Amino acid sequence: MKKTLAAFVLVAFCWTGRAGDAKTDGATHGKVLAPYVDEDTFLLVHLDVSRANIEAVFERVKELGAPKHMQEGKAVLEGLRGRFLKAGGKDAYALWNWGNAFEDVLVVATVTKDGSADKVAEVLSEIGPLQAKAQPGLVVAGTPAALARLKDLKSQPVPALAKALDAAGKHAAQVVFVPPSALKRSLIETFPDLPNELGGGKSEDLAPSVLWAAGGLSVGDTLQAKLVIQSQDARAAERFGQFAEKFMVFAQLQGAGAVPPDLPPDVLKLIPMLTPKVQGDRLVLDLGDREFKNVIQPAIAKVQNAAKRQTSANNLKQIGLAMHIFHDNHRSFPPAVSYDAKGKPLLSWRVHVLPFLDQAELYLQFKLDEPWDSDHNKKLIAKIPEVFVSPEAKKVERGKTTYLVPVGPRTIFSEKKGTTLNKITDGTSNTILAVDAEDSRAVFWTQPDDYKLDPKQPIAGLVRPDAKGFQVLFADGSVRFIASTVNADTLNALFTMDGGEVIQND
């Protein structure tokens, strides 16, 4: 059932278009929904499918740097929308009841005079495990449990739904939340006292401050979003506004604690931008392209870059652990390259540490006596383990990696045989074992090729454009970020394992 919810939320996000051109008001929506709501109806999603702009939404998704899997499915959504409209579908509503939480969902779709309710029902059946039933002028779909609940439903007007939909604005996608009394009681019992960081006090004093909340989103040539929170009165709105401001500060600071220290100033800019402002008995938040492009998008990019850096560091740590397990088993680190009896290069060290990265099955598929690009072995390039894929790499062909070991005089990988720990006389915490290089230095992961150290320019090929440094794995298994301003002599000293240099901390 969670798949049904996820699918509808995804469609809700993608079926958005220009704001301000809707002809249906809250009262009209209320008449359509009246037979299907009661006092336990707490969440509503409304979609005006005819105003969809899926192309614009996916462009925004790319701008945000969302994961690739979130950028997929464009053709599926466009096809779904096309079939829905061709069948005569117009508005779609999804309703949830508190008594059943998210275990079932009820979907209601209106049909134009010239449309076919039966064909619209077929389209709705494609969204999760829904059973759709056609009625004159509309279609009702849901899980068996939701449809069974509908038979015994004693519908009851919920005026808040119509008011909330109007307040959300003429957006293609609208969401309304009406907190049921059961939820309020549960929160009061679970959190009777508010944390001091949020102003303290009793939660029962704050609970009446929210009668409903409504949001609207439109994505077209410009982005527009609106959030409205209806309070009991102006005093309650002021009280909740103070709570919301403190909550935003608390949430942003909590989030900033897990990322690099240069993030908080950028993140803190979001607090006033994302905090609703008190307007009479309501709190209102309007967002548009200016906020998105100038503040929100850059701040999100900062968070995403920090997450990528952390993931890359974790990859390097796994590689370091595999190297040490290899050392425990073979009494040395792996050589950078394996050779045949005639001295011909065969495979990279990355292949030989596979058994220690939980990739023993893949390791057994290689012909270790053949080169990396033999007819057999080159077929395995596409099976690159994710641990060798740096999330910081932007323009790297699939099958290539930017995780390289330094190769050159006095590095750990300067000999054809693997190096032992006792040869690292400069100390494992002062000697680089591997690097995450820039994209132009990427090699196929099975290829016996790595970072060739140039003592005159030891940093060449290590710093990505717009980056302030690069990450390295040290021989003790630790991962550190080295600034692009590092002194060349210091960096050379870190690359050599037995130079006897005194490391200067720049």
Image (cartoon, grey):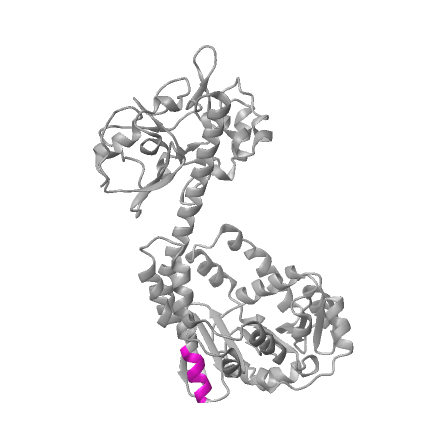
Q: Position of residue 416 (x, y in %)?
A: 40, 17
What residue is at 67 percent from the left and 80 percent from the top?
Answer: 37
Tally of numbered discs? 0
Q: Is residue 202 left or right of residue 309?
A: right
- Examine the structure image and report whether residue 238 is included in the region drawn in magenta: yes
Q: Main secondary structure of the magenta part?
A: helix
Residue 281 appears in the figure: no
Residue 378 painted magenta: no
The residue range painted magenta reads 234-242
Q: Residue at x 64, y 59 (%)?
A: 3
Residue shown at 38% from the left, 28% from the top = 450
Left or right: 134 as drawn, with respect to 298: right
Q: Quadrant of residue 396?
A: top left
Task: Give the camera-side residue of 42 and 424.
Answer: 424
Percent position (x, y) of residue 412? 36, 25
Quarter of the picture holding the N terminus: bottom right
Quarter assignment of residue 136: bottom right
Q: Nearer the viewer, residue 35 or 178?
A: 178
Q: Position of residue 108 (x, y in %)?
A: 67, 74
Q: Residue furthest top?
A: 342
Quarter of the image where one finds residue 470: top left
Q: Position of residue 48 (x, y in %)?
A: 57, 73
Location of residue 227 with respect to 436 vertically, above or below: below
Quarter of the image where the C terminus is located: top left
Q: From this viewpoint, is residue 486 visible?
A: yes
Q: Is residue 30 above or below residue 307?
A: below
Vertical order, 465 against 205 (above or below): above
Q: Is residue 286 found left or right of 68 in the rendered image? A: left
